[in-house]
Image: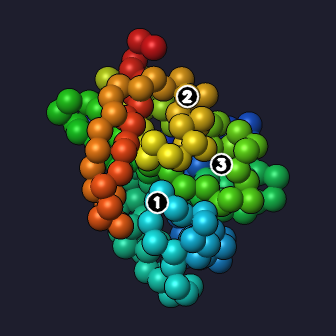
Amino acid sequence: MNIYVQMASFNLIETEQLVLRPLSMSDDKDMFAYASQADNLVYVFPAHKDIAETRLAIALLFMKAPLGKWAIENKADQKMIGTLTFVKLDEKQRTAEIGYVLNQAYWGKGLMTEAVRTLTDISLTAFGLNYVDIVVDSKNLGSIKVAEKAGFRIADSYKALSPYTKVLRNFRRYRKGKHE
């Protein structure tokens, strides 16, 4: 079955503590709460200056083509606390790279690990992917822990320009395959 048809059937994913769901404009305040905090985004993207920038990001980056992009909603307080997306998807090779961001107020609680583990398991089974990658700045210890706790292993390390700062950085590619 086509991977996009499969993704459409998994647009709502429930875990023990989270709901992974499509983003909507009503998520603007929750997203702005973390997207406007530079210390929350050191390895991700530049901080949003105002709510209008957040609304534009929701419309263009998440709602325009929503498949493979999920809001992370915390069941305990029903807040949208981050996003989890397929940054790259190769239909032919049946591979993907996922990226994520989480509101700093929810760091260290195992929530992102739960989200990543769940999406990866679905990707390797229901979506039929051969492997899933996570690319992490080598200084981003929180994301390294998420990848390792979710069962990913280092595939390689390399230097590249950061997409936002254009500074040469060290990156690690973590990978989890079907049979791991």
Q: Position of residue 77 (x, y in %)?
A: 81, 59
Residue at which label 2 appears: 148
Can residue 174 be seen in this snapshot? yes
Of discs 3 and 1, which sits in the foreground? 1
- Residue 27: tell me if it is visible: no
Circle 2 sits in a helix, a strand or a loop, which is it?
A: helix
At horizontal 52% and vertical 85% (from top left) the residue drawn is 49
The answer to which of marks 3 and 2 sits earlier in the sequence is: 3
Figure check: 176 above or below 102:
above
Residue under the point 57% across and 71% down: 38
The vertical placement of 26 against 180, above or below, is: below
Residue 178 position in % (x across, y down): 40, 18
Q: Nearer the viewer, residue 104 or 137?
A: 137
Which badge, 3 or 1, comes first in the chain's sequence? 3
List the single residue furthest toward the right: 76
Q: How far, Cα to Cα, is label 3 from label 2? A: 22 Å
Considering the image in quadrants, where does the N terminus appear?
A: top left
Residue 131: quadrant of the picture? top left
- Mark 1 belongs to which amino acid? Val
CB of mark 1 within 8 Å of CB of mark 2?
A: no
Which residue in the structure is indicated by mark 1? 44
The residue under the point 51% across, 74% down is: 47
The mark found on residue 19 in the picture is: 3
> What is the CA distance from the residue labelled 1 to the residue labelled 2?
19 Å
Disc 3 residue crowd, few under 14, some 14–19, many 20+, Cα 10 Å? some
